[in-house]
Amino acid sequence: MPYITVEGGPLDAPSKKALIEELTATASAIMHVPAEFFLVTIKELPDENIGIGGKPIDEVKAAYRREQEGAGSR
Amino acid sequence: MPYITVEGGPLDAPSKKALIEELTATASAIMHVPAEFFLVTIKELPDENIGIGGKPIDEVKAAYRREQEGAGSR
Amino acid sequence: MPYITVEGGPLDAPSKKALIEELTATASAIMHVPAEFFLVTIKELPDENIGIGGKPIDEVKAAYRREQEGAGSR
Amino acid sequence: MPYITVEGGPLDAPSKKALIEELTATASAIMHVPAEFFLVTIKELPDENIGIGGKPIDEVKAAYRREQEGAGSR
Amino acid sequence: MPYITVEGGPLDAPSKKALIEELTATASAIMHVPAEFFLVTIKELPDENIGIGGKPIDEVKAAYRREQEGAGSR
Amino acid sequence: MPYITVEGGPLDAPSKKALIEELTATASAIMHVPAEFFLVTIKELPDENIGIGGKPIDEVKAAYRREQEGAGSR
């Protein structure tokens, strides 16, 4: 303890290693708890298992990309 | 936020989409929080990773079916 | 099982009872699992324990209200 | 309810069945709640998704083994 | 890691200490992981925040007691 | 989504605000997901609800302090 868990989409091994290292270092400094006490887990979920605003996240991502492209072309 | 997570057995894509939509709509109305703020995740577990009353769920399901069949034949 | 948990801000008792009843009924119909197997928990957090987009939620709520008022006066 | 969840590395089926049975029995006796009300889930994560003290757990396990071997040879 | 969390109603300090000790010892033996690696947390929820079978748990408890008394008087 | 949750002991408001901001920024850079999609929650638990290595955390903290003092005086 403390225990940090990250839920999100699929990640590669280097990103997981970076999350474990950097989230521990960041939280250890803020919470004044030695890094050795920290536990971190990363829970990867497929897109169809995640929803934001009542819509599956792949729909949300597509709308976000359109918005970015629209903003970029104005 | 709010964050709704559903843990259970394997589900097909249409059921996940329906859970994301309908749980968000139901909770949004009750909690008076706009749907756009809601996050939903669905965590699927194999039967052998779930226990009810100290027994693995496949044993519980089998007993439940026998009970239903027994009630049906009386 | 299945297990539904809702994390969010403080709620009154009637809203909690409604969440327990309606989320169970909604998910039971979608997942084809009898309601009696469902477990629901509600976890209430103070605003300062919740962040969206890197900002504490009370800042996010204030910005959302200004946005709504701005949209209403146009 | 109560709900017990165990997060850790991969496990075989007999170990999962034993965890479901024995954690339920142990907690039921301590909490004075009938075993039939207990829900247990087991969440298995790959090593690269787990970190202790800011390091991925496979590094932690290797250091622990070296420590044990070092202590054994003294 | 492994990480065991227990969600349930309010508990006194001796019960929490016993859960921490005995759940760790039980799981350590089954999972063949040294006890020193285990993290345990206990999350206490008020009754109105817990639902089984779509009903708040205080209603479920009352029905359970009536059932036990009925069975006792037959 | 992604969703980061931090479980630990009691924290003051400035530390919570810093955790929300800095964990979001750190993870956003590593996961290549815009900060606006991140949800962070902080769950504070009393010491008696936390155990490491089968012992309540206040016992673990006391042993850690003695160890540090011992190392300091050698």
Image: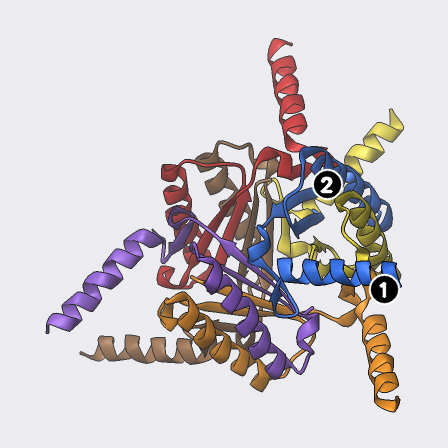
Chain colours: A blue, B purple, C orange, D red, E brown, F yellow
Residue E14 appearing in the image: no
Residue D44 appearing in the image: yes
Q: Position of residue A41 (x, y in %)?
A: 65, 44
Label 2 belongs to which residue?
Answer: A37
Residues B65 and F16: in front is: B65
Of the residues shown, which amino acid type is indicated by label 1? Answer: Ala
CA distance for labels 1 and 2: 22 Å
Residues C24 and F44: in front is: C24
Residues A22 and D2: in front is: A22
The answer to whether B21 appears left or right of C46 in the picture is left
Label 1 belongs to which residue?
Answer: F13
Q: Position of residue E60 (x, y in %)?
A: 40, 76
| Secondary structure category for the residue under label 1 | helix
Q: Is residue C68 above or below residue D10?
A: below
Given the image, what chain letter belongs to the residue carrying mark 2? A
Of all residues, the one furthest to the top in this rendering is: D73
